[in-house]
Amino acid sequence: MRILLLGFLLIMSSAVIAQTPTIESGVPLELAKWRAAHYSDVRYKLNLTLEKMSPVLKGTIEIRVKVGARTLLSASSQGGEIPPIILDWRKVKDHEEKSTITNVTINGKAAEFSRHSPRADKSVRAPFEEHNEHLIFRDGVVFGENVIKLDFTSPILTSGSAITRYIDKEDGTEYIYSLFVPSDASTAFPVFDQPDLKARFTLTMTVPSSWKLVSNTAYPGSDATGYKKWMSQDVVGAINAPGEWITTTTFAETKPISTYVFAFAAGPFEKFTDAGIGSNPSGNERAPLRSGIPTGTLPTGRVTASAPEGSIYVRRSQAAKFKPHAAEVFRLNREAVKFFEQYFDYKFPWPKYDLVLIPEFPFGGMEHAGATFLRESSIIFPQEPTKNDHISRATLIFHETAHQWFGDTVTMRWFDDLWLKEGFATFMAYKALEKIMPEMNAWKVFYERVKQAAYQTDSTRGTTAIYQPIANLSAAKSAYGAIVYNKAPAFLRQAEFYLESDKFQTAVRAFLKKHEFANGAWQDLVKEFEASSGRDLNVWARQWVTFPGVGVVSSFIPSELCWMQKKDRNSGNVWDIRTQALLRFEDGSEKVEEEIRRPTSRIGFECTPVRSTTDKRIVFGLPNYGDYGYGIFLLDEKSRDYVLKNIQYEKDPFLRTMMWGALWDSVREGELDPRVFVELVVKVLQNPAREQGRNKGDDSNALTNVRASATEDESTTALLLNRVGTAMNYYMSEPPALAGGQKLGPGPTDGPAANAARTDLRSRVEDMLIERMRDAPTLGQRITFYRAFLSIASSEKARGVLKDLLAAGGNPSGSEGAPKRSGAPKGTLPTGRVTAIAIPIKTKDRFDIVTRLLILNDPDAPKLLADLEKTEKSDDAKRWAYAAKAGIPTAENKAKYWNDFINDKTMSESWIEAAFGPFNSIRHSDLTLPYLQKALRELPNHKRSRKIFFVNGWLGAFVGGQRSQEALDIIDKFIADNPNLDKDLRLKILENADIIERAVKIRAKFGR
Ligand SMILES: [Zn+2]
């Protein structure tokens, strides 16, 4: 049997070898599969030189690769045609001349460009060609190990390249870092740029001696390599002073890693080390620094708490600001490592774990193996932080730490399975939050932050399955979005509930162990799920992983609970959901029903008999209690009425936020008037529940609890106020005219009465926010109200409050009366004087306030900004000032900014990203409508040249800046006129257009 199989594979192999894939640009899946079948044991030896202010990276690379069918065959036994070696080597648009290749050898023989290329030298025996972003070696390749050596240069830019230079305008220092995900390593040097050709990297770097270096592994220390002096002027250039000292450093070889998690950063960083994370009392369990790296579990099979060495690198000008955060960031990181080691039963996989804070980093973080890069402003809060900010920072750190196992140790085979690593990283981050910060109510926050965004995308026409086929890595950036970051972890939470948590954990551990330092696909994970649960999960898994969309489940409660699931509008699917429901009866008793919802021939209509309690009337039923299921669960009418009347008395904050969520779903589905929702939020947030409760004569202890949970819950408050903003900006009337009598665009068709009612509600929302900014008992609460106010404020009174805040910002002590922590907060002091708003206003807040005033066309705004710019000169302040001015509501200004966005090639992406929000304020939709179609036309350019999340942000801003049928028509026409637009871009447009579609529908229905 075994021999027969071998023979069969031999035939297969030679057949595959004969068919070298066609050479297309990018990294096509076909090429990647072919390479994975023919190449193995890849090693890169990189020698890089970074010179101050040099526009290029200079280096040499030695590439070792075994050629021949990957399995079964030794080199000598293989016959037939030798497969070529095909490397990826891509040039950056408009900077092609900076990418060069010279001194190429293959297996010791010089290789020149082949006769197909303009630089042909027909006399050379080992030519290679450069074709469609690949270097192809056909001659000189042998079965077994091959060694290619070459010199290269590649661009270092402030924007648009894989190696980025950041110049700190405060002190003139320079920082250089790499960011290769998903397949940009091949723009820095020739490489096999696919996740399943994992390689061992050995990196040697020569940099100015005053710089620090970080890469995936540790290095032996500078004394081992010694110092050299810059010798030649052509290397030094004009900027480096001749005689400046340089250092050459060699890092230890990595374990096999994918190209996209290889990284380095260099510059005059300050290095922070943690006594806790670096020290190791027991002395023998710490992962060693260099080689002899430990693999996974200890011989006993049990992991012990290890302490991988770890430092945090911060740019020099921000080191003092980071200092107060250092202990907490180290703690979060250390606790996360400890928790994951236990949960996965797998020791920290890398020899050390550093964090590098990168200014204006395009993502929250990137999980390079052993060296996570984090956006500096996500760690050093630019504003006074709230609980929400602390949750964001913690979950970011946990997410990246979880990736060290899920993503870095076991990697998806191809970016179609991106969801595997991102889903696990976020799901595990919340598990860590639950354990490390139990006071944050992790799964409630998961419901509020992760689930809501998933539903929001998944209920649009632009949604995709969590598994997204990708034919070429040039399109991989499009896979990033809410489906991968939000739905995938939501599915894993459902899977854990479906399988039961111990079986889920067993499967995850097995998956990791089986595919360590290699790759796995989603089917491999499902195999482990089946093994641990003993169930056939093929149909269930295929449905969740490969079908797009979300089930919309309606409830009916005659005498028992019935659910009906609508067929999905995208896929026609009916989802197999396992979850539980809460039933509350007229006497106040409760029952939790657990049911498996399988698709049925009757379109998913199923009833849960309410056993043993049939004599009691159900007053309220909440489907998906505990939030294990994934779906939009609409309340029946009776339960909705119950929630509208009783939500402020609900004691359980998780249940309460699910009630709010169900009401909001009703608004989004067009079942509930958005005004009713906004009125209820105003009522609940402005009136202490205690007072309403007293009127009702309920138990006083319980009501104190209600008040306490309602006021402390910054997470829910922020979410509710965000929904109020959406309702007012999109689902309700046109916003009122701008200050100074300027009215942008035609008004709504409704009459003066509706206008007055609307103004009344808007001013009541403002008043409630002003009141709570003053009297909410915690600083975090007050800041939460302030941030909502900032995005809603529009009346003259509100603008006055903003200006007061700005003026008081110089005196942030709030000596005028920060309210006491306990006791009934009141709007006035005993003297009867209104309390000042006690919120520390930092530089970022000042720019935010001025931005809002500019958007509102406040006559004082330009002067306030000019004053601010005189005193605030930091890098960040310059960016914020630039962004603020994008909010000036004139056609000339919008034209100027549009020109910057499109034509200024030197502008860094972070500046554009900061500015396109104020540019597209919903209040300026008439001014920006002319740019909508142009913005859509830019998408293919952005997709090609910008970083991963840029397209999403761009679309969110330009489409989200509109709310009219006219805008929708422009979008539909654009899609109709461009049938050849990439499918992923078309879907992204449809996803973003959903907010306008709903807005138009809801306004038509509720007429205000
Ligand atoms: Zn991630």
Image (tube, rainbow, N blue to C red):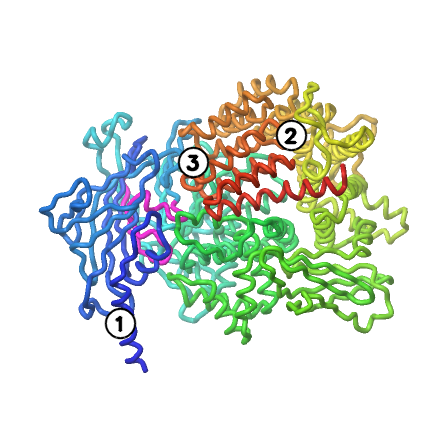
Tag 3–tag 1 contact (CB < 8 Å): no
Q: Is residue 498 above or below residue 328?
A: below
Q: Disc 3 or 1, which lies upstream in sequence? A: 1
Q: Amino acid at mark 2?
A: Arg
Coordinates of residue 197 in the picture (x, y in percent) = 33, 57
Q: Amino acid at mark 1?
A: Ile
Q: Amino acid at mark 3?
A: Arg
Tag 1–tag 2 contact (CB < 8 Å): no
Q: In the displayed structure, does residue 80 sit left or right of residue 715?
A: left
Q: Which residue is mark 1?
A: 11
Closer to the camera in the image, 509 or 130? 130
Q: Disc 2 or 3, which lies upstream in sequence? A: 3
The answer to whether residue 151 of the structure is visible from this angle is yes
Q: Secondary structure at mark 1?
A: helix
Q: Secondary structure at mark 3?
A: strand
Q: CA distance from mark 1 to mark 2?
A: 67 Å
Tag count: 3
